[in-house]
């Protein structure tokens, strides 16, 4: 038996329970992991509330972790018992032990510690696909990043700066503004006090930005469109304020022949080749120190409900890790 955080019904953070679960032996192609730490991500909130249904309940939540391979299933040749590995976007991470397919795992170098590894995969690979695939940035571009002091935000802003990109960061407080500036944001917009498109126009001399990376959703959709230059790209990749409501594509024409996309990390790591490409590039920039993964909060896994409340109340910055 092992302990895990599960939900028995959808709802608030109070639905997260610390349960005993049976793990069993790995099937063919699987391994059993002894997990060391888990990452906390906003998608975990969507799963808990039922915005993203997770299938049969009760269900173990959580989408990323780092652990040690304890046992190999038949046919697994790419890993060995004792390997330290991490993974993103695989439900069931909030657990002391788990079974998982071997081809979802990435070996983690010794130079990257457990907390960094637990926090970097989902958020770092999200930053990767936004910068390199959704809108492939070029040196000299100006982009707008919402939640610039959050987990994805701090990674993306540092990475973008290394690529020669000018970053406008959107945050909710002076404290978060200072953090965003220290991590690559050249300009800050305090969304509670300033009109976002007006400030973007002032910063860019009326041109607008090449891309907007928007994890907020419903509340910022119009402001994001109005911040783009002609032919600009809006990547609405999260729903912190709720899903974007249906809209007519005809509104994109007079705003500058704009592009709107709703990407998801699942598509960008759907094959082993895509996962490895992104993970290798991410590990590279983290190991070199070009991108630092900032773990600013830790909670014991059994206190997962407290971590969810802090995340939803916007009390966190950078990454949060659940320790085991």
Image: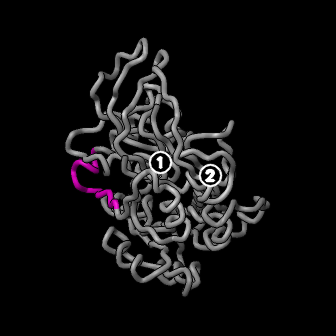
100 and 300: which is toward the camera? 300
The x and y percentages for residue 85 are 34, 35
Image disc number at residue 95 = none
Q: Nearer the viewer, mark 2 or mark 1?
A: 2
- Provide the residue designation for mark 2: 48
Q: Secondary structure at mark 2?
A: helix
- Provide the residue designation for mark 1: 129
**Residue 208 figure quarter:** bottom right
Q: Earlier in the sequence, mark 2 or mark 1?
A: 2
The x and y percentages for residue 201 are 54, 80
Cα separation, mark 2 vs mark 1, equals 25 Å
**How many residues crowd mark 2 within 10 Å: few (<14), some (14–19), many (20+)?**
many
What are the residue bounds of the magenta stretch? 284-295
Does the magenta-highlighted stretch encompass residue 288? yes
Q: Is residue 140 above or below residue 26?
A: below
The x and y percentages for residue 211 are 52, 62
Does 153 sit left or right of 258 as displayed? Answer: left
The x and y percentages for residue 195 are 58, 83
């Amino acid at each position: 038996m092992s302990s895990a955080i599960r939900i028995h019904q959808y709802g608030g953070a109070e639905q997260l329970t610390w349960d005993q679960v049976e793990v069993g032996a790995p099937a063919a192609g699987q391994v059993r992991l002894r997990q060391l730490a888990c990452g906390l991500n906003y998608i975990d909130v969507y799963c808990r509330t039922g915005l993203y249904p997770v299938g049969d309940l009760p269900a173990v939540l959580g989408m990323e972790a780092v652990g040690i391979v304890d046992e190999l299933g038949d046919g697994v040749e790419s890993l060995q018992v004792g390997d330290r590995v991490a993974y993103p976007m695989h439900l069931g991470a909030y657990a002391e032990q788990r079974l998982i397919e071997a081809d979802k795992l990435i070996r983690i170098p010794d130079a990257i510690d457990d907390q960094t590894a637990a926090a970097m995969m989902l958020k770092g690979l999200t930053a990767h696909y936004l910068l390199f695939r959704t809108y492939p940035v070029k040196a000299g571009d100006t982009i707008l990043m919402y939640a610039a002091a959050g987990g994805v935000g701090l990674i993306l802003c540092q990475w973008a700066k290394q690529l020669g990109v000018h970053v406008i960061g959107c945050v909710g407080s002076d404290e978060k503004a200072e953090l965003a500036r220290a991590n690559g944001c050249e300009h800050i917009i305090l969304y509670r006090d300033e009109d976002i498109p007006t400030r973007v126009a002032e910063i860019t001399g009326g041109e607008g930005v090449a891309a907007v990376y928007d994890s907020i959703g419903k509340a910022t959709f119009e402001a994001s469109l109005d911040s783009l230059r002609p032919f600009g790209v809006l990547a609405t990749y999260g729903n912190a304020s709720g899903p974007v409501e249906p809209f007519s594509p005809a509104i994109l024409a007079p705003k500058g022949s704009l592009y709107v996309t709703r990407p998801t990390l699942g598509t960008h790591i759907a094959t082993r080749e895509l996962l490895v490409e992104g993970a290798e590039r991410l590990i590279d920039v983290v190991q070199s120190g070009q991108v630092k993964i900032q773990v600013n909060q830790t909670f014991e896994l059994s206190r997962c409900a407290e971590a969810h409340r802090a995340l939803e109340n916007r009390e966190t910055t950078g990454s949060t890790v659940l320790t085991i």
